[in-house]
Amino acid sequence: MISEKMKNSDFHKFFVDELRDLYWAENALLKELPKMQKASTSKELADGFAKHTKETKKHISRLEKVFESLGEKATGKKCEAMAGILKEGKSIIEDTAKDTMTRDAGLVLAAQKVEHYEIATYGTLKVFASHMGHKEAERLLAETLDNEKATNARLTGLAERFINKEAVTE
Ligand SMILES: [Fe+2]
Ligand SMILES: [Fe+2]
């Protein structure tokens, strides 16, 4: 149970506000991932985006559970940072040619910027939750944090295994 005193504290309000920002960011990302999948040259990268689309749906429902655990409504608030990162992703697609590995190298860059932003946000909000004693929120945020880190590592793996090498020689 969250006490009235906690609910009215500036830190708690700030935490909830940042959760709304993150909720908006995940929903915005969910719309872009299928476009990144379609723009991919290699099947491996396209499959990676398909996988992360499914995972992102889970991130969204986990955030809904976080709001629920705090007795708050799940609503989003525009995240200017994610909006900017996604806009940059679009221009990376425009700036690279279809069916090239340079396109895939660019998509990995765009996707890793997204993952790093998510890792920073989930990491910090998890620690906030821990310090406020919001155990359920902490557990849910940690779960998604682990998945974002794994996604980032998978992207590095694809880039190092073949994408960058093939981009250099095309
Ligand atoms: Fe996510
Ligand atoms: Fe992610």
Image: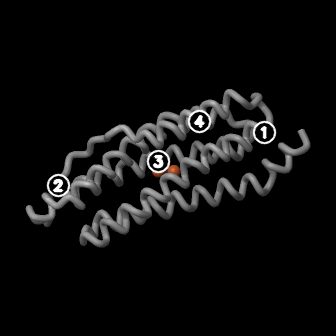
Q: CA distance from mark 1 to mark 4?
A: 16 Å
Mark earlier in primary sequence (2, 1): 2
Residue 63 drawn at (x, y percent): 34, 52
Distance of label 4 from label 3 (alpha carbons) = 20 Å
Total marks in image? 4
Task: Give the residue number, with chain letter if any, for mark 3.
Answer: 56
**Which is closer to the viewer, label 4 or label 3?**
4
Q: Is mark 3 within 8 Å of ligand 1?
A: yes
Question: Mark 4 = which residue?
Answer: 88
The kind of residue on which mark 3 rests is Thr
- Image quarter in which the C terminus is found: top right
Q: Position of residue 20 (x, y in %)?
A: 31, 46
Which of the pair 137/120 is nearer the observer? 120
Q: Quadrant of residue 2?
A: bottom left
Rendered location of residue 37, percent (x, y): 62, 37
Asked whether, in this view, residue 2 is left or right of residue 159, the answer is left
Callout 2: SS: loop
Residue wearing tag 2: 71
